[in-house]
Image: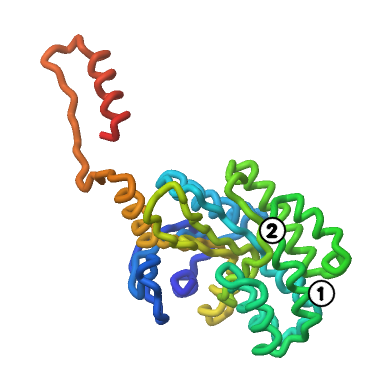
Amino acid sequence: ARYLAMNKITNIKRYQIAKVYRRDNPSISKGRYREFYQCDFDIAGSYDPMIPDAECVKIVYEILSVLKMSPFVIKLNHRKLLDGMFEACGVPLEDFRSICSAVDKLDKSPWEEVRNEMVNEKGLSEECADKIGDYVRLNGKSDLVEKLMTDEKLSKNKSALEGLEAMSLLLKYCEIYGTSDKILFDLSLARGLDYYTGVIYEAILLEDKSLPGEVSVGSVAGGGRYDNLVGMFDIKSKHVPCVGVSIGVERLFAVMESRQAALKLKQRTTEIEVYVATAQKNLLEERMKLCNELWNEGF
């Protein structure tokens, strides 16, 4: 976002792999480090609604599929739906972000712990917390979107309806892109960063119980839409729509190494290039067959 603002760029599609840093105390045994490599993929510019968002989901789907990271799931949600849900449940506007951070813990903590935090630590009424609980424990596919569009509370909230309409379109495009089998619309997905303005997503590696000693990593990719972030770095606050995803390269490596060790597989560390040649010119088909055999073996 800072790069776009400083260089007055309003349209770009790019990726990079570089080191990033975090300040917390990560669990190294679960593939979390303070200094680590991360792959970022972003699309900036004005497009038809949800087209670039669906492409980011497709990118994550392809990467995890090619690396044979199954089983995995890509969770989707929308910040407007979250805000509309909080409003419909009676959460004061000034408490949206703090309640959102509590909801974001549902992937690691049971509902009762999250509810306790909302009520006893953040001062939310028990009634509001219970209403939120009715929603954030829901997940599904397009049928859940349709159900929520007729919900008594959400159907009367503008922000929630806008979020649901966007989710309906995104899930439609995911179906076209062939990623629906790994998609889960999850109302508990909140992601803590305040700059997200639309769709949010997170890719979760599920434990493969068939492998002994499997490393449980959890989230390996996450992102969403951040339409207002570029304007924060621009002196004229120029609006540039953006959506992107970050992929934890070293987390994926931790899982790959663990699975290869469990299966007693050897990883090729250097690439071997093979040049197929013959002394005679009339052996073209034989060379083609040999090339095909080598390609099939990964050369």
Query: In the image, residue 173 lies at what x, y percent?
Result: 65, 47
Q: Is residue 45 left or right of residue 271?
A: right
**Rendered view: 22 above or below 167:** below
Using the numbered discs, state the Cα–Cα distance from disc 2 to disc 1 in whole angstroms: 19 Å
Asked whether 46 or 192 is in front, the reply is 192
- In terms of secondary structure, where does tag 1 sit? helix
Q: Which residue is mark 2?
A: 139
Circle 2: residue type: Asn
Q: Residue furthest left?
A: 279
Q: Residue at x 53, y 82 (%)?
A: 235
The answer to whether one can see residue 79 in this image is yes
Q: Nearer the viewer, mark 2 or mark 1?
A: 2
Q: Residue at x 20, y 12 (%)?
A: 283
**Rendered view: 171 above or below 106:** above
Q: Residue at x 67, y 76 (%)?
A: 112
Q: Please tell me the numbered disc located at residue 109.
A: none
First in sequence, mark 2 or 1: give its number. 1
Mark 1 burial class by Cα count in 10 Å: few <14, some 14-19, many 20+: many
Circle 1: residue type: Ala
Q: Residue furthest top?
A: 282
Q: Is residue 101 left or right of residue 221?
A: right
Q: What colouring style does the render use?
A: rainbow
Query: In the image, residue 175 lies at what x, y percent?
Result: 65, 43
The answer to whether one can see residue 239 in this image is no
Q: Quadrant of the C terminus?
A: top left
Query: In the image, residue 172 lies at what x, y percent?
Result: 69, 47
Q: Residue at x 40, y 75 (%)?
A: 26
Q: Residue 238 is drawn in which quadrant?
A: bottom right
Q: Please tell me the numbered disc located at residue 88.
A: 1
Query: In the image, residue 152 lies at what x, y percent?
Result: 88, 65
Q: Residue 272 is drawn in which quadrant?
A: top left
**Rendered view: 80 above or below 56:** below
